[in-house]
C-alpha cells in the first residue's frame, strides 16, 4: 500500500553572501559567479567561500553570457533540463531549456530572463540557444 501526504513547511533562510550576489545579479539580468582572491578559482553559482582553498576572501564576478550544455534530460512532464557550464568557471547551472526542439550536448546557450525581475531564482526562465 502506498500513502501520500503533503507536509506544508513554510520557512525562510538567509541567502548568505554567495546566493545574495547571485540573486542580485539575476535582478540585473546577469549571471554572477565568484572568484577566489586566494587561489584564483572561479565558480558558478557563487558561494561565500572557496571550496578549493577554503578562503573566504572571494569577490563576485559576472560570468560569460553564453554557456555550453554539458548534459540534458527530459523530466516525466516533458520539460527539458540542461546543465550549462561557463568557460573559466567551475560548476554550472541546471535549468530549463526554453528553446524550440531538443537541446544537444555542446550547444551554445544564453540565459533568458523575465522582463520584470525582483531578485528571485524565478528571474531566470531558463536557457535558449544562441
Ligand atoms: Zn581559493
Image (tube, helix red, strand yellow):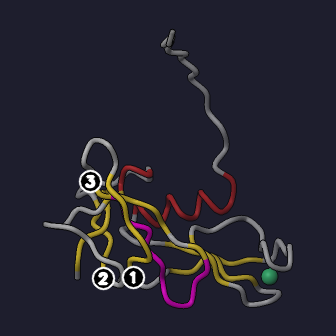
Residue nearer the viewer, 81 or 115: 81
Q: Residue furthest left?
A: 100
Q: Which residue is mark 2?
A: 107
Q: CA distance from mark 2 to mark 3?
A: 27 Å
Percent position of residue 117, x then y: 33, 54
Helix, strand or loop at mark 2: loop
Q: CA distance from mark 2 to mark 1?
A: 6 Å
Helix, strand or loop at mark 3: loop
Work out whether 86 lies above or below 113. below
Q: Quadrant of residue 67?
A: bottom left
Point out the stretch of residues depicted in magenta: 81-90
Q: Quadrant of the C terminus?
A: bottom left
Percent position of residue 9, x then y: 58, 21
Marks 3 and 1, the one that precedes in the sequence:
1
Ligand 1 is found in the corner quadrant, namely: bottom right
Q: Which residue is mark 1?
A: 68
Residue nearer the viewer, 87 or 48: 87
Marks 2 and 1, the one that precedes in the sequence:
1
Q: Are marks 2 and 1 in contact (CB under 8 Å)?
A: yes
Residue at horizontal 27 percent and vertical 66 percent from the top:
112
80 within the magenta span: no
Q: Are marks 3 and 1 in contact (CB under 8 Å)?
A: no
Q: Specify whether 65 is left or right of 44.
A: left
Residue at horizontal 26 percent and vertical 54 percent from the top:
116
Q: Which mark is residue 116?
A: 3
Judge depth for marks 3 and 1 and give the one in front.
1
Work out whether 48 lies above or below 121. below
Marks 2 and 3, the one that precedes in the sequence:
2
Helix, strand or loop at mark 1: strand
Q: Please rate how many residues cluster around mark 2, counting C-alpha atoms within 10 Å: few if below 14, some from 14 to 19, many from 20.
A: some
Q: CA distance from mark 3 to mark 1?
A: 26 Å
Amino acid at each position: 500500500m502506498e500513502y501520500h501526504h503533503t507536509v506544508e513547511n513554510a520557512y525562510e533562510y538567509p541567502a548568505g553572501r554567495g546566493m545574495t550576489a547571485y540573486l542580485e545579479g539575476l535582478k540585473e539580468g546577469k549571471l554572477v559567479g565568484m572568484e577566489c582572491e586566494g587561489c584564483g578559482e572561479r565558480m558558478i553559482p557563487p558561494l561565500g567561500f572557496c571550496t578549493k582553498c577554503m578562503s573566504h576572501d572571494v569577490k563576485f564576478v559576472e560570468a560569460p553570457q553564453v554557456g555550453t550544455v554539458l548534459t540534458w534530460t527530459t523530466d516525466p512532464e516533458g520539460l527539458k533540463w540542461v546543465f550549462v557550464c561557463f568557460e573559466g568557471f567551475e560548476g554550472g547551472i541546471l535549468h530549463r531549456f526554453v528553446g524550440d526542439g531538443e537541446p544537444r550536448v555542446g550547444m551554445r546557450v544564453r540565459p533568458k530572463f523575465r522582463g520584470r525581475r525582483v531578485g528571485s531564482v524565478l528571474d531566470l526562465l531558463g536557457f535558449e540557444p544562441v
